Image (cartoon, grey):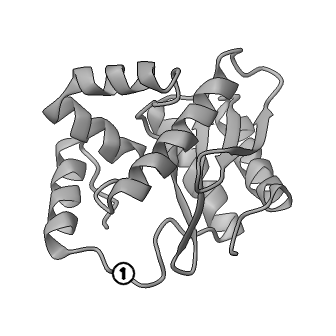
């Protein structure tokens, strides 16, 4: 079975920390497996006390929604989707899952080949800073946010692109 290991999380955490120190935004980082169980979690010394739980919840949300549909490639799309359709449902879902549903930037699924192996979450900066740290780390470790074989229907891609545009995200595509 293809999976992500705690050892593989170390270089990602180190790269996030490097960027966090550069921009002055201490964070917590979490990686969960495809079933949402925690694999690794780390909190920088000056990160807020609530950031570890938030990072884990972001990762959990990214993997949970990605397993539902290719329509949810990251936390920003999940957030925009709920804002447009049913914000109360996101609150209700978070309550049902003991606070483990948090839709925000700084989280996305992780693939090895065509297999979803987990998701990461970063918390402590602004949504944009968390995203910036993630992209810096992803470039260093080579984790893929998409399956190797793209089977996403064109209608779903158009919908995600529309959600990105509405959220003001121009540099990302699905």
**Nearer to me, 100 or 22:** 100
What percent of the width, then of the height, locates residue 94? Answer: 43, 24
**Nearer to me, 128 or 144:** 144
Residue 73 visible in the shown view: no
Which residue is pictured at 17% across the width and 75% down the height? 154
Which residue is pictured at 24% across the width and 44% down the height? 168
Residue under label 1: 150
Please tell me whether residue 133 is drawn above or below residue 118 in the rendered image.
above
- Local packing at callout 1 (Cα closer than 10 Å; few below 14, some 14-19, many 20+) is few
What percent of the width, then of the height, locates residue 92? Answer: 33, 20
What percent of the width, then of the height, locates residue 76? Answer: 36, 43
Residue 144 visible in the shown view: yes
Which residue is pictured at 34% across the width and 53% down the height? 72
Q: Is residue 131 left or right of residue 103?
A: right
- Quadrant of the frame with the C terminus: bottom left
What percent of the width, then of the height, locates residue 145? Answer: 50, 65
Which residue is pictured at 37% across the width and 27% down the height? 93
**Nearer to me, 120 or 22:** 120
């Amino acid at each position: 079975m293809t999976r992500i290991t705690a050892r593989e999380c170390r270089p990602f955490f180190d790269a996030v920390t490097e960027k966090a120190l550069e921009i002055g935004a201490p964070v917590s980082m979490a990686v969960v497996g495809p079933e949402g169980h925690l694999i690794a979690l780390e909190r920088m010394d000056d990160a807020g006390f609530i950031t570890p739980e938030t990072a884990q919840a972001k990762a959990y949300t990214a993997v949970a929604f990605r397993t539902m549909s290719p329509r949810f490639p990251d936390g920003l799309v999940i957030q925009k989707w709920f804002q447009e359709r049913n914000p109360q449902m996101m609150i209700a879902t978070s309550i049902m899952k003991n606070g483990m549903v948090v839709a925000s930037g700084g989280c996305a699924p992780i693939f090895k080949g065509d297999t979803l192996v987990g998701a990461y979450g970063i918390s402590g900066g602004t949504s944009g800073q968390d995203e910036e740290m993630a992209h810096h780390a992803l470039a260093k470790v080579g984790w893929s946010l998409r399956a190797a074989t793209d089977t996403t229907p064109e209608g779903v891609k158009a919908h995600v692109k529309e959600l990105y545009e509405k959220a003001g995200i121009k540099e990302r595509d699905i």
